[in-house]
Amino acid sequence: MSETPSNPEASTPPDSGEEKAWYQKPLNLIALAVIAAVALFAAFGGFAGDEDDLVIDDPEEEEEIVDEEEEEVVDEEEDVTEEEEDVDETDNGTAAPGDGPEIVIRGQDFSEAITLAEVYGQYLQSLGYDVDILTPAGFRDEAIQGIETGELNMIVDYIGGSQTALRPDDPSSGDPDEVMEVIRPAYAELGATVLDYTPGTNGDAFVVRGDLDAETISDVADMDLVFGASAQCFERPQCFIGYTDPDIYGIEFADTQTIEFGPILGEALAAGEVDAVVWNDTAPQIEEFGFKVL
């Protein structure tokens, strides 16, 4: 017979050796009940901390909150507009563009220089600056003279060409930063400030008709070509003087013609009046007429 315990309430049930499941333990049941209550309470909005999460049963109360939110949005938009106006007026503490002097710019009288003057001038106008874009006239010498006399207060020029005009005896360089070191003080002597150069590149090119049997400048040395170029080219060592120098190219031209720099050079070349010209290598007529750059 099995022995009966004297105090049944104090007795411990025999261990069956099986671990009870978590939901069979009293403390876990209490925890589960609390978790369920919290989850249920939160589901009905009891723990919502933001107005956006509230569940509203009263339609009139909902309309009032929506109206308040719309007013807040309008107020925020007005604040942003005022801030934008403040930025436009102060421009981070600098004067507005219209407060400065009138900018007077004039392009040199050939296609690319005319375009550059218009690009810079119109861009500055779009920013609110007072800009007078004069009718194109002359070339580099006239542009620099315009700065000296005060007729112009802005010019756009090639840095290599500026060095040739202002410091012709200084060593030339293919490094634009080195060229800038030469021309900055040169322009400073004229009372002008040189701004940073742009990455765009353009240069003078030896241009011939597409049917000419030549690929390099040296190929035309003995072809007896008629050469056309602007008056300035015939005075420059990097132009006619260099082409005809026996120690450089040694070209012997059959004849030469002085032609105004610009589209007229292309017209003369296309018409066969000349066989070769010196022109800027970005001239659109080079591709249009099938010319070759040597």
Image (cartoon, rainbow, N blue to C red):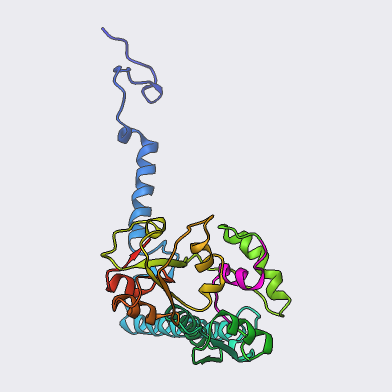
Q: Which of these two is toward me, 249 or 129? A: 249
User: Looking at the figure, which quarter contains the N terminus?
Assistant: top left
Indicate left or right for 164 with 215 as reference.
Answer: right
Indicate left or right for 128 with 52 as reference.
Answer: right
Q: Say which residue appears at 35% left-offset and 47% top-offset.
A: 33
Task: Write the start and end of the magenta stretch as one range.
Answer: 155-170
Indicate left or right for 292 with 164 as reference.
Answer: left
Look at the image and say whether residue 271 sits in the magenta stretch: no
State which quadrant residue 13 falls in.
Answer: top left
Q: Say which residue appears at 61% left-offset and 60% top-offset.
A: 172
Q: Which of these two is toward me, 195 or 276? A: 276
Q: Which of these two is toward me, 76 or 243? A: 243
State which quadrant residue 67 falls in.
Answer: bottom left
**Residue 98 placed where, x, y %?**
59, 91
Q: Is 68 rendered above or below residue 170?
A: below
Q: Which of these two is toward me, 126 or 199? A: 199
State which quadrant residue 264 falls in.
Answer: bottom left
Q: Is 275 rendered above or below residue 258?
A: above
**Residue 49 placed where, x, y %?**
45, 65
Q: Say which residue appears at 68% left-offset and 79% top-offset.
A: 192
How many marks the image carries: the answer is 0
Look at the image and say whether residue 168 sits in the magenta stretch: yes
Q: Residue furthest right?
A: 189
Q: Residue furthest top?
A: 1
User: Looking at the figure, which quarter contains the C terminus?
Assistant: bottom left
Q: Is 72 rendered above or below residue 184?
A: below
**Residue 203 placed where, x, y %?**
47, 67
